[in-house]
């Protein structure tokens, strides 16, 4: 089982980098022994969502640990912010509304530990409100800094596929003008995850078949219900958007190929141009 004190779920040694301890929060690499965490959790029969959020939390822990050790506080906070809102709130919590999971409390505890150096008083108050034992011996500040989490990489990758499917459905539905739609596919994986896809993508059903608008931006053959007229408008709009993107890429490439621009323009502007070009080519 995974234990929040890191005894069984951690591998390797505690991180060496850390912040000077101001007495207001845990420090990465702290030599405090800490207390046993509030909750224990096993990922034995857990969903792909559980494995995914463990991977995301572990990636965040490693990044925050490194950034705090380098005194790059704003960047560390940015990692925490996007992990909590983009990963935990947007995907994990939303998925947990229809999936049986025993990791919710563990994830909250882990997030509180990561957030403690940035918001010591708020996180301590939330931590205390979770306890049913003697509060005097279970302060959040006395807990060990989170260590490496174990998870199944392939299970986490499966949830990445779900995210890509849901994003493509949402994007296509917006371009089609919105409304309630169903998804059709003959793919076994997607059909096995039908309830999750249905909930996250807000479609009316996920069923077998190959009728409707074909979605081309996933690894699976998927069809979103749409009329012939809607499919025609969608195709025309996509073609127009692709042409506009190609033209924009051509302009940016020409700008970066201009030696005078690269050498004389402000460094920040050149960097922005390169970043915009890379983003356009990626999407």
Image (spheres, grey):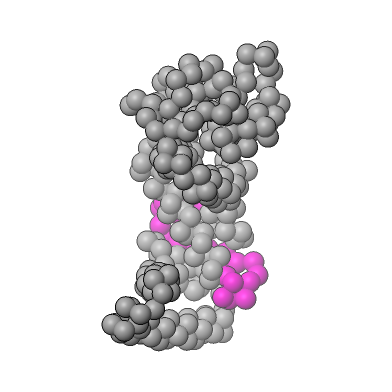
Outermost residue, front side: 264
Q: Quadrant of the C terminus?
A: bottom left
Residue in the image at 45% along x and 85% along y: 244
Residue 113: percent from the left, percent from the top? 55, 31
Q: Is residue 208 visible?
A: no
Residue in the image at 59% along x and 61% along y: 203
Residue 124: percent from the left, percent from the top? 65, 28
Q: Is residue 203 left or right of residue 212?
A: right
Residue 106 or residue 188, whichever sits in front: 106
Please report the bounds of the magenta region as a residue range.
173-195
Residue 109 or residue 39, whichever sits in front: 109
Q: Quadrant of the N terminus?
A: top left
Residue 213: percent from the left, percent from the top? 49, 74
Q: Is residue 247 visible?
A: yes
Query: Can you say whether 187 is above or below 124 in the image?
Result: below
Residue 137 or residue 181, whichever sits in front: 137
State which quadrant residue 155 falls in.
top left
Q: Is residue 204 left or right of residue 30?
A: right
Q: Is residue 252 magenta?
A: no
Residue in the image at 41% along x and 74% along y: 266
Residue 38 or residue 76, whichever sits in front: 76
Q: Report the number of discs.
A: 0
Residue in the image at 57% along x and 58% along y: 201
State which quadrant residue 176 falls in.
bottom right
Query: Can you say whether 148 is above or below 174 in the image?
Result: above
State which quadrant residue 111 falls in.
top right
């Amino acid at each position: 089982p995974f234990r929040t004190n890191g005894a069984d779920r951690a591998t390797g040694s505690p991180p060496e980098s850390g912040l000077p301890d101001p007495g207001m929060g845990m420090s990465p690499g702290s030599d405090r022994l800490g207390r046993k965490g509030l909750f224990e959790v096993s990922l034995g029969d857990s969903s792909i969502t559980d494995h995914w959020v463990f991977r995301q939390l572990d990636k965040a822990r490693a990044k925050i640990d490194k950034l705090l050790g380098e005194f790059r506080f704003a960047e560390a906070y940015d990692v925490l912010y996007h992990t909590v809102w983009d990963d935990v709130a947007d995907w994990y919590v939303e998925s947990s509304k229809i999936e049986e999971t025993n990791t919710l409390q563990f994830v909250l505890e882990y997030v509180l530990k990561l957030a403690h150096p940035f918001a010591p008083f708020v996180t301590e108050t939330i931590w205390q409100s979770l306890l049913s034992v003697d509060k005097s011996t279970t302060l959040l500040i006395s807990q060990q800094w989170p260590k490496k989490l174990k998870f199944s990489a392939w299970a986490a990758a499966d949830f990445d596929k779900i995210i890509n499917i849901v994003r493509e459905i949402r994007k296509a539905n917006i371009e089609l003008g919105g409304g309630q739609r169903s998804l059709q596919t003959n793919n076994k994986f997607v059909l096995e995850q039908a309830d999750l896809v249905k909930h996250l993508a807000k479609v009316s059903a996920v069923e077998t078949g190959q009728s409707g608008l074909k979605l081309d931006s996933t690894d699976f053959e998927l069809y979103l219900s749409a009329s012939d007229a809607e499919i025609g408008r969608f195709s025309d709009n996509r073609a127009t958007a692709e042409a506009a993107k190609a033209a924009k890429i051509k302009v940016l490439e020409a700008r970066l190929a201009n030696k005078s621009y690269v050498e004389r323009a402000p460094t920040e502007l050149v960097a922005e141009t390169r970043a915009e070009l890379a983003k356009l080519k990626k999407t």
